[in-house]
Image: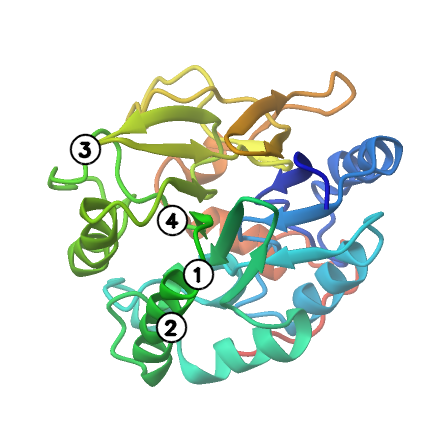
Amino acid sequence: MADSSFIAFVSDPHLSRERPFFQFNWEILVEELSQRKPELVIVGGDVTLDGASNPSDLEFAREQLDRLPCPWLAVPGNHDIGELASSENVASRINHERRSRYIQTLGADFWSVDFEHWRIIGLNSMIFSSGLPSEAEQEAFLAQSIAGAEGRQIAVLSHIAVCCNSLSEHDSTGWFMPEPSKEMLSSYVRSGKIQLFLSGDMHQSRDRMIDGVRHVWATSTAFVTDMMEEWRPKFGGRKRVGWTELQFGKDVAVTMHEPRRMVDFDVGNWVYGGTALYYEFARGSRFPGFGSAKDTVA
């Protein structure tokens, strides 16, 4: 392996066979990565439009990921596998069945991969603070992966961002990791065992040092929300569609790419009053004649 390895960090493509709202940008991404030839693509979750309820979205996402010009690894997001256990909407929460469908279709939901000087550990952030048996299994896997890194630096990939400005802050927005999970990861930060956090979910790009650790947010290839920042909380990122180039050597060089051919879809109107309208479009209750959506599975 060369001293510097090019990895494409892609997130939130929201793919769907029946509702291919954002397929245009995915086609541009596949073309661009085929020309640039990364060694690996890592995907920061929300691969699907609504895979948590529609297995067809998961199947289509697998087909699309397999079109990439190199190996890929993905972690799940809420649209793939269900919301955090703390979600007020019980029907939307992660459960064993949803997690099993994801794993059967897209592979392991937590994993690790090594490069010359780094170990990247992918985590399923949707099982954080869930009480599911897989939560304890994942924490044990994380501990073992860090302990066995053999001098490599550690990067952790998850769908949900760890925090906004400080590991010690209280999150009043609901956008960041549950407090117990953030504290669990912070314990590794305090002992100097994690050097980089990678995340998706926010649909904006950002690269900051927080409490001595670098936090990189990957933007979405699919869409942004409230680009003009008129009503959504402001987190300081850049709201443009694209993908992120990571050059892993002894350090990490980060380059945000915003291909001109990609369309900056802004779905702010869909979610201004909540996510209900988004799911009406995603699940087919709006424009039922569009595509050939299969029956959904709770």
Pick whichever, 38 or 257, lies toward us. Answer: 38
Outermost residue to the front: 151
In three-dimensional space, the C-alpha distance between marks 2 and 4, rounded to whole angstroms, equals 15 Å
Pick whichever, 212 or 179, lies toward us. Answer: 212
Image location of residue 257, percent across then percent down: 65, 22
Image location of residue 55, percent across then percent down: 65, 73
SS at badge 4: loop
What is the number of the mark on residue 61?
none
Asked which quadrant contains residue 242, the reply is: top right
**Nearer the N terminus, badge 4 or badge 3?**
4
Crowding at mark 4 (Cα within 10 Å: few <14, some 14-19, many 20+): many
The residue identified by callout 4 is 160
In three-dimensional space, the C-alpha distance between marks 4 and 3, rounded to whole angstroms, equals 15 Å
The residue identified by callout 2 is 138
In three-dimensional space, the C-alpha distance between marks 1 and 4, rounded to whole angstroms, equals 10 Å
Q: Are marks 2 and 3 in contact (CB under 8 Å)?
A: no
SS at badge 2: helix
Residue at left offset 72%, top offset 46%: 1
The nearer-to-camera label among 4 and 3 is 3
The nearer-to-camera label among 2 and 4 is 2
Q: Are marks 2 and 1 in contact (CB under 8 Å)?
A: yes
